[in-house]
Amino acid sequence: MTVYQEKFAEFLREVGNGKKMVLSTSGHDVVTSRMMSVIQLNGSFYFQTDRTSRKYAQLLENPRAALCVDNIQMEGLCRETGHPRENTEFCRLYEEHFPHAYQLYTALENERLFRFSPVRIERWVYQDGVPYLEVMDIEKQHYERVRYQGQ
């Protein structure tokens, strides 16, 4: 296993299967952000949204998006995959981690499931109080950790 593979696997374990994250999207040169209930499955991140929402329209116009949680920022591409109920593993995990949202929204006709595929991940880590920026380039399968040299 390469250093990149080890670090990416470690990252996915730390993030877990269900987290609330900030999703940022853009359309017509306007960036918007909102908190989302996100499921991680096999290295991709899934969320559902109403097809009449502004975020849905923005994702159709521009599939590039960002997810942010804690000190982690992910840049990636979103793709609509259908109705949430068509993905049984997503539904199982979504109901487990976000039962109230699952009950309220998942079965609604207008709900659509998106898969966010990260292309770049950045996160701050601290070793003995010293800050480092970790960067994972998913497409190149490259990992680097650089000590922060702020002045």
Image (tube, rainbow, N blue to C red):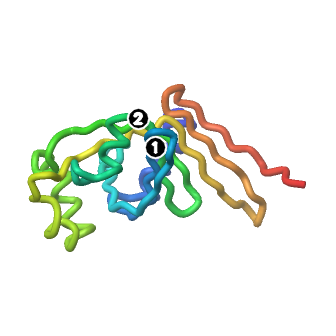
Residue name at image x 75 percent, y 65 percent: 128
Dividing the image into 4 quarters, which one contains the C terminus?
A: bottom right
Question: Do tag 1 and tag 2 residues touch (Cβ < 8 Å)?
Answer: yes
What's the residue type where badge 2 is placed? Answer: Asn
Name the spot of residue 49 as percent of width and height, x first: 26, 53
In the image: residue 2, left or right of residue 46 = right
Name the spot of residue 95 as percent of width and height, x first: 18, 65
Name the spot of residue 54 as percent of width and height, x first: 33, 51
Residue name at image x 22 percent, y 59 percent: 93
Residue assigned mark 2:
62
Q: Nearer the viewer, residue 122 or 8?
A: 122
Q: Nearer the viewer, residue 1 or 5?
A: 5
In the image: residue 103, left or right of residue 68 = left
47 shown above or below 96? above
Which residue occupies the extreme right position in the image? 151
Q: Report the number of numbered marks.
A: 2
Q: Secondary structure at mark 2?
A: loop
Q: Nearer the viewer, residue 54 or 24?
A: 54
Residue assigned mark 1:
26
Which residue occupies the extreme bottom position in the image? 100
Q: Secondary structure at mark 1?
A: strand
Residue name at image x 20 percent, y 52 percent: 90
Name the spot of residue 34 as percent of width and height, x first: 42, 60
In the image: residue 41, left or right of residue 76 = left
Please tell me in which quadrant of the rendered image residue 13 appears: bottom left
The answer to which of marks 1 and 2 sits earlier in the sequence is 1
C-alpha span from label 1 to label 2: 7 Å
Mark 2 surroundings within 10 Å by alpha-carbon count, few (fewer than 14), some (14 through 19), many (20 or more): some
What's the residue type where badge 1 is placed? Answer: Ser
